[in-house]
Image (cartoon, grey):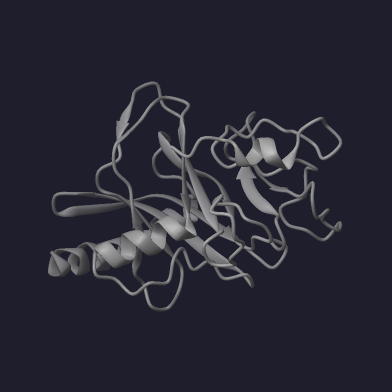
Amino acid sequence: MRKMFRFFLHLCVILAASAATTGISNGQVLINEYMPDPARDWDGDGEYNYRNDEWVEILNTGDLSIDLTGFLLRDGGDQILWRYGFSGELAPGETRVVYGSDALAWEESNGFPRYGLSLNNAGDELFLCHVVEAETLVVDTAAFGRSAVDDRSIGRTVADVGVWAIFDAWNPCPDSCSPAGNGCIPTPGEVNNCTTALAERSWGSIKMIKRR
């Protein structure tokens, strides 16, 4: 099994270069929102941890349910390792959130070093890959820089999934942020409909979002 993962990993690295130029190579399952630098208890375990409370959310933008078997996440580090492998079905319009604590458990159960999602606060890149038999495709990529800090998530806009914004309601971006801040609250487990910090939306209600 480990040899097979290594083989798929090398294929993913080769294909990543071409996918990175387009950003999206498959319009059905996309990286939708992610939190590189958490400052609160996002995974709901009752304790803040900078590694466990990172998260990545994917979204099914298609019209049919998708079997997530073979969909894997990795980051853009020099030591390229799988961070998480998805499973189950993802219905049209449905999201799936992976927290750093989930990634740690998956890595341990699959014999990988326990790094979690390992999103570098100074800037990093995410790759969503799909392994089908002997073929590995980079389905989607997402990159971020230093402006993604302290409870700012980066996500796609509902109106145009090709446009990214920083969800910065709890830590407003300066004008230099790229992409720009939108004043919205990060919402793991929900489609990115904008809720501002001034709206009647409590942190408790965010934490009550069911983890799928």
Residue 17 shows up from this direction: no
Tell which residue pokes out farthest to the front in this image.
46
Q: Is residue 35 above or below residue 198?
A: below
Q: Nearer the viewer, residue 212 or 77?
A: 212
Relative image position of residue 204 (x, y in whole percent): 69, 40
Relative image position of residue 55 (x, y in whole percent): 53, 54
Q: Quadrant of the N terminus?
A: bottom left
Tell which residue pokes out farthest to the bottom in this image.
78
Question: In the picture, residue 197 is in which quadrant?
Answer: top right
Image point (25%, 68%), residue name:
10
Q: Quadrant of the C terminus?
A: top left
Question: In the picture, residue 91 is in which quadrant?
Answer: top left
Image point (75%, 40%), residue name:
184
Image point (25%, 43%), residue name:
69
Q: Nearer the viewer, residue 94 or 103?
A: 103
Residue 106 shows up from this direction: yes
Image point (50%, 45%), residue name:
57
Q: Is residue 110 left or right of residue 116?
A: left
Q: Is residue 126 above or below residue 162?
A: below
Relative image position of residue 95 (x, y in whole percent): 48, 35
